[in-house]
């Protein structure tokens, strides 16, 4: 599959069948994330893969607790990937301060996109989750207070090959210009 085909194939999948995902395939997605670029090569990420049903159920409760019940489709996902941000490099922090930005978030976004594109290539559906109870997730996974969880990714095979329609996108002329 060409990179263009993989990019077109990736869509947010929110209906999963119960087939488990081979750890070998998950490792392949992790290896794709591992190759992502990052500011100062800081690689400020850690991926916690939760595919043990009992732990996954507890994690689902944490993710959805309180006002975060919206993403209940994750209960059918056989795998949840908790993306932990671990910013350590002082030089990146200086850049962030001077430029008033957050390079770590860009790094995480790129690494996660590598991950989900490799999953798409393997025929595995994913959905990013930005709406979840971070405090509860960190508590049950015993993630240090200094670290952040900005994203969770749900993973699973799409139910009955029931692929959603691609979402509309802005026209190229709206999002770009040549000078
Ligand atoms: C940072 C981020 C956070 C997102 N959070 C959620 C979420 O909490 N729940 C959800 O169902 N989809 C979530 N999405 C998926 C977007 O809704 C989806 O990518 C967008 O509508 C485009 O559709 P597509 O992924 O099928 O191309 C998120 C996507 C991104 C990149």
Image (cartoon, helix red, strand yellow):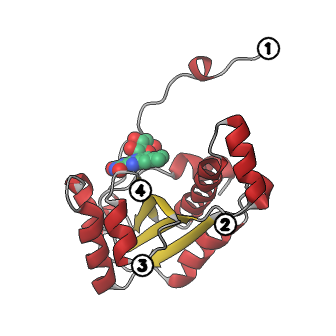
Q: Nearer the viewer, mark 3 or mark 4?
A: 3
Q: Find the distance from the CA under tag 2 to the CA under tag 1.
A: 34 Å
Q: Nearer the viewer, mark 3 or mark 1?
A: 3
**Distance from mark 2 CB to nearest ligand 1 atom below 8 Å:** no
Classify residue 158 as left or right of residue 41: left
Q: Find the distance from the CA under tag 3 to the CA under tag 1.
A: 50 Å
Sequence-wise first label, 2 or 4: 2
Residue appearing at x 73%, y 55% in the figure = 38
Badge 4 element = strand
Q: Nearer the viewer, mark 2 or mark 3?
A: 3
Residue appearing at x 23%, y 52% in the figure = 70
Badge 3 element = loop
Other-residue count near label 4 (Cα within 10 Å), few / some / many at <14 / 14–19 / ≥20: many
Sequence-wise first label, 3 or 1: 3
Q: Which one is in front, 30 or 28?
A: 30
Classify residue 78 as left or right of residue 107: left
Q: Find the distance from the CA under tag 2 to the CA under tag 4.
A: 17 Å
159 lies above or below 96: below
Badge 2 element = helix
39 lies above or below 101: below
Q: Which mark is residue 127?
A: 4
**Distance from mark 4 CB to nearest ligand 1 atom below 8 Å:** yes
Classify residue 56 as left or right of residue 21: left
Q: Which mark is residue 32?
A: 2
Q: Is there CB contact under 8 Å for labels 3 and 1? A: no
Q: Position of residue 156 (x, y in %)?
A: 39, 68
Other-residue count near label 2 (Cα within 10 Å), few / some / many at <14 / 14–19 / ≥20: some
> On the image, numbered disc 1 is attached to which residue?
179
Q: Find the distance from the CA under tag 2 to the CA under tag 3.
A: 26 Å
From the image, which quarter does the C terminus lie in? top right
> On the image, numbered disc 3 is attached to which residue?
142
């Amino acid at each position: 599959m060409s990179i263009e085909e993989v990019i077109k194939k990736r869509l947010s999948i929110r209906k999963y069948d119960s087939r488990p995902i081979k750890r070998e395939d998950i490792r392949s997605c992790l290896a794709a994330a591992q190759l992502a670029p990052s500011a100062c090569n800081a690689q400020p990420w850690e991926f916690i893969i939760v595919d043990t049903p009992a732990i996954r159920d507890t994690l689902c409760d944490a993710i959805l607790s309180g006002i975060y019940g919206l993403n209940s489709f994750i209960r059918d996902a056989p795998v949840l990937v908790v993306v932990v941000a671990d910013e350590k490099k002082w030089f990146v922090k200086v850049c962030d301060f001077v430029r008033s930005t957050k390079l770590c978030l860009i790094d995480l976004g790129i690494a996660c996109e590598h991950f989900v594109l490799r999953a798409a290539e393997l025929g595995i559906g994913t959905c990013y989750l930005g709406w979840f109870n971070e405090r509860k997730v960190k508590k049950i996974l015993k993630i240090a207070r200094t670290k952040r969880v900005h994203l969770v990714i749900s993973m699973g095979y799409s139910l009955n090959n029931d692929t959603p329609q691609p979402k509309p996108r802005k026209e190229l002329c709206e999002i770009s210009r040549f000078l």
